[in-house]
Amino acid sequence: QAQLVESGGGLVQAGGSLRLSCAASAILFSLDTMRWYRQAPGKQRELVASISGGGTPTYADSVKGRFTISRDNPKKTMYLQMDNLKPEDTAVYYCNSFRRGRVDYWGQGTQVTVSS
C-alpha cells in the first residue's frame, strides 16, 4: 500500500527556516510528479510547489525565491526548503504524489507555524 510520510514541521520565528521531508513507499517514485500543498485554517488547500520525475520545479508566486523543492529518487524522498518564512506561511503542509490515470496519494500533513 502506497504511503507518504511528512516530517520537519514545527514552530519558527518570522525570517527563519524549516526543511520538510516526504518519504514515499510502495510507489514508483521516479515516475511520479511530487507536490507540496498547504492548508491554512479557514482556507482552501493550495499548491505550493511541484517537481517532475526528472526534477523540474514549479512554484506558487507567493513562495518564489523563498522555497526550494527537491527530490532524491533513489531515496524516494522529496524535500521543501523554506527560507525567510512569514506568518502567512502558517499552515498544515501536505505531500502529494501524482501520476496521470492513477489516484493521487497524500500524506497525513505536518504543521508549520511561523510567529511574528
Image (spheres, grey):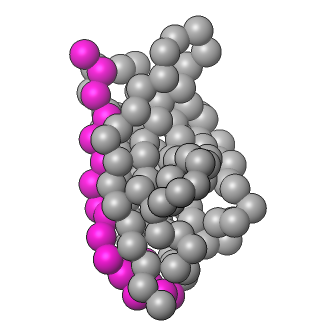
Q: Nearer the viewer, residue 108 or 64?
A: 108
Residue 31: x and y in percent read 51, 22
**Taking 65 as reference, is 39 left or right?**
left
**Taking 50 as reference, is 31 left or right?**
left
Would residue 2 be counted in the magenta stretch? yes
Residue 53: x and y in percent read 55, 31
Region rendered in magenta: 1-17
Q: Quadrant of the N terminus?
A: top left
Q: Nearer the viewer, residue 86 or 55?
A: 86
Do we see residue 31 in this rendering? no
Residue at 27% x, 54% y is 7
Using the image, determine if residue 98 lies above or below residue 54.
above
Q: In the image as oriented, which residue stretches furthest toward the top?
A: 101
Quadrant of residue 113 within the rendered picture: bottom left
Using the image, determine if residue 4 lies above or below residue 68.
above
Residue 26: x and y in percent read 28, 20
Using the image, determine if residue 77 lies above or below residue 24.
below
Q: In the image as oriented, which residue stretches furthest toward the front?
A: 42
